[in-house]
Image (cartoon, grey):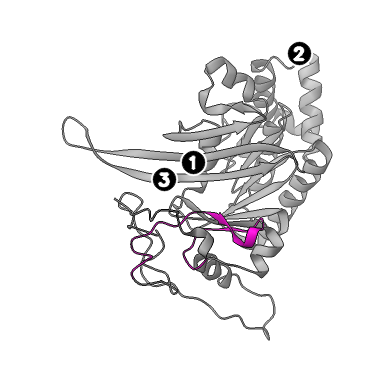
């Protein structure tokens, strides 16, 4: 039985919409809406979905860089959502993040060595010569030179900056890292280098990843399991191979049909979704996907909100009324 490192239950993050002179709250943007999943120790969970579906918000809410509106995040047996500032500071050693844009996440006025040394001092890991030695070792571990410690962020290429971001995350020897689209700003050849580096570090240091990405090919390569998000909710979650070979949710099917096949003789039927993604400030009633769904069950999908449930008692979970397991015990009608 695999050991569960991270357990997320009914996580919600609503951003208030304020209007008028008195900044009265007139509504909420439901960026993350009732999301639950588990990540086992040493595995990589890929998180995919369209832009604006709430992937990055989930990653930042797990680390409490953004405060959750509701729900529970349990990391290694400890409730992250109930922690005070001191407990949260200690937790930062175990939970880290690699940001999407390596340049904006690095301080332009500090050298690379200075940035990493500051982290080591803050967490009381090392100072002086010991800290300097650790910085050099970290830079070599991510494929950079010891000489790079004295340089500033603007002196590096995009791929090198992302390696610095990885070195910074590794400096506190974490157990879990949120990889927030770490390769989306890089060209393909550099992407493969960073992906291989992350995989090598995972084996060497026994790391656990939440890998957020738009690129389904990259997610397929690096992930053990994959979760598909739509409009702030997880609609399908399964082992990587099974999800890519036996997709259940209509949205996942449409998403995977857009992945190009590197063979001009082989053709894939493209599923074109009609309409636009609804606003998270005004979500549809019933199933959130029903206005765009090509397999809609008229009279049901518009009113009944499906549950994320195990399909045929397997680890493959889906949130769709095409499958009996997703029907709530009592029809949950949207307000």
Residue located 64% across and 26% down the image: 115
Foreground of the two, 316 or 65: 316
Q: Residue furthest left?
A: 21
Which of label 1 and label 3 is nearer to you? Answer: 1
Q: Indicate which disc, 2 or 3, sits on the residue closer to the N terminus.
A: 3
Question: Which residues, given as a range, are shown in magenta?
Answer: 299-323
Q: Indicate which disc, 2 or 1, sits on the residue closer to the N terminus.
A: 1
Q: CA distance from mark 2 to mark 1?
A: 44 Å
Classify mark 2: residues with Cα within 10 Å, few (<14), some (14-19) or many (20+). few
Q: Percent position (x, y) of residue 270? A: 53, 78
Residue 31 is labelled as 3
Q: CA distance from mark 2 to mark 3?
A: 43 Å
Residue 38 is labelled as none
Q: Residue furthest bottom?
A: 265
- Place residue 132 in its image quadrant: top right
Write down the residue under mark 1: 10
Q: Does the stretch in magenta take in 308?
A: yes
Q: Percent position (x, y) of residue 153? A: 62, 36
Badge 1 marks a residue whose secondary structure is strand
Q: CA distance from mark 1 to mark 3?
A: 13 Å
Write down the residue under mark 2: 128
Badge 3 marks a residue whose secondary structure is strand
């Amino acid at each position: 039985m695999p050991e569960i490192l991270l357990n997320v239950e009914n996580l919600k993050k609503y951003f208030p919409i304020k209007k008028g002179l008195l900044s009265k709250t007139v509504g909420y943007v439901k960026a993350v809406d009732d999301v639950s999943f588990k990540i086992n120790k040493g595995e990589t969970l890929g998180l995919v979905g369209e832009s604006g579906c709430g992937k990055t918000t989930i990653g930042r809410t797990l680390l409490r860089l953004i405060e959750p509106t509701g729900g529970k995040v349990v990391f290694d047996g400890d409730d992250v959502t109930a922690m005070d500032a001191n407990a949260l500071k200690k937790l930062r050693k175990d939970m880290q993040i690699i940001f999407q844009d390596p340049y904006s996440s690095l301080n332009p006025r500090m050298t690379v060595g200075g940035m990493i040394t500051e982290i080591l001092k803050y967490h009381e890991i090392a100072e002086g010569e010991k800290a300097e030695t650790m910085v050099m070792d970290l830079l070599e571990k991510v494929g950079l030179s010891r000489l790079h410690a004295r340089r500033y962020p603007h002196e590096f290429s995009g791929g090198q900056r992302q390696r610095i971001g990885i070195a910074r995350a590794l400096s506190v020897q974490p157990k879990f890292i949120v990889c927030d689209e770490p390769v989306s700003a890089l060209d393909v050849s550099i992407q493969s280098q960073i992906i291989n580096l992350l995989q090598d570090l995972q084996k060497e240091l026994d790391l656990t990843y939440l890998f957020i990405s738009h690129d389904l090919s990259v997610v397929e390569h690096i992930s053990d399991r994959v979760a598909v998000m739509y409009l702030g909710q997880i609609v399908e979650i399964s082992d990587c191979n099974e999800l890519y070979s036996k997709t259940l949710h209509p949205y996942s099917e449409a998403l995977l049909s857009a992945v190009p096949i590197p063979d001009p003789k082989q053709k894939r039927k493209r599923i074109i979704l009609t309409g636009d993604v609804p606003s998270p400030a005004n979500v549809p009633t019933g199933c959130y996907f029903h206005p765009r769904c090509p397999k809609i069950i008229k009279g049901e999908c518009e009113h009944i909100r499906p549950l994320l449930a195990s399909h045929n008692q397997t680890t493959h979970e889906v949130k769709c009324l095409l499958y009996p397991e997703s029907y709530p015990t009592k029809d949950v009608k949207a307000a």
